[in-house]
Image: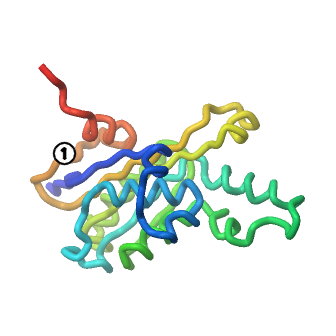
């Protein structure tokens, strides 16, 4: 039987983005890409030790790119029209590209939109099928306050990430019921309890 393990986990919020220092390009990204990229950075993975063409990226964009889409659309009445820079982020998969560019990862990638879309199972399948040796799984939720009002949903700006590999040693051996990255990160990233 194959064992798949989580070797690193992280969770970041908008406050972490404001404190991040990842170069000038980082400041030009939309919030979803910033969160996703920072979650991957927070894993502490040394990609120099990985075969970059064998690292997959699986992203679950809970609200798609809806916040960025709404920001882009609201710019239609601005002088000069909507921002061409923002246009590049009107795809839910834009964060995958930013992660791949920063770490020069050329393995397979997948973007799923919605909640609990089976992202961990997809990552395991990429490894099991031999398409990848390891996989970054990133879950990102960005719903701005103005969008939250429109869609009657709570505002949110957070991302969590796990790094999955075949093996038996790591933070957590994946089990059949490990399907939700957010719940898994809440357990794996919890501060140690003080007795």
Determine which residue is flagged by label 1.
172
- Closer to the camera, 188 or 118? 188
Nearer to me, 128 or 159: 159
Q: Residues within 10 Å of mark 1 (few under 14, many from 20)?
A: some
Give the answer, above or below, for where 72 lies relative to 154. below
Closest to the observer: 168 or 177? 168
State the SS at label 1: strand
Position of residue 65 measured from the top left corner of the image (x, y, whole percent): 63, 55
- What is the quadrant of the N terminus in the image? bottom left
Quarter of the image where one finds residue 137: bottom left
x, y percent for residue 79: 88, 65
Q: Is residue 156 above or below residue 71?
A: above
Decide which of 62, 18 is in the foreground and name it: 18
In the rendered image, the quadrant that contains the C terminus is top left
Q: Residue at x 59, y 59 (%)?
A: 30
Q: Residue at x 70, y 68 (%)?
A: 87
Residue at image coords 53%, 43%: 157
Judge left or right: residue 2 versus residue 77. left
**46 lies above or below 51:** above
Task: Give the quadrant of residue 189.
Answer: top left
117 sits to left or right of 190: right
Q: Position of residue 57 (x, y in %)?
A: 39, 65
């Amino acid at each position: 039987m194959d064992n798949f393990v989580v070797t690193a986990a992280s969770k970041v919020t908008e406050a972490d983005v404001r404190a991040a220092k990842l170069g000038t390009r980082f400041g030009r990204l939309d919030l979803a890409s910033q969160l996703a990229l920072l979650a991957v950075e927070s894993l502490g993975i040394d990609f120099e030790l990985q075969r970059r063409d064998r690292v997959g990226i699986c992203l679950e964009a809970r609200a798609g790119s809806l916040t960025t889409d709404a920001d882009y659309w609201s710019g239609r009445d601005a002088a000069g029209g909507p921002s061409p820079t923002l246009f590049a982020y009107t795809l839910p998969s834009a964060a995958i590209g930013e992660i791949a560019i920063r770490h020069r990862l050329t393995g397979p990638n997948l973007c799923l939109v919605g909640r609990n879309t089976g992202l961990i199972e997809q990552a395991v399948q990429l490894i099991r099928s031999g398409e990848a040796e390891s996989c970054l799984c990133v879950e990102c939720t960005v719903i701005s306050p103005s969008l939250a009002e429109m869609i009657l949903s709570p505002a949110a700006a957070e991302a969590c990430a796990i790094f999955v590999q075949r093996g038996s040693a790591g933070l957590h051996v994946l089990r059949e019921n490990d399907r939700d990255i957010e719940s898994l990160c809440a357990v794996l990233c919890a501060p140690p309890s003080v007795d």
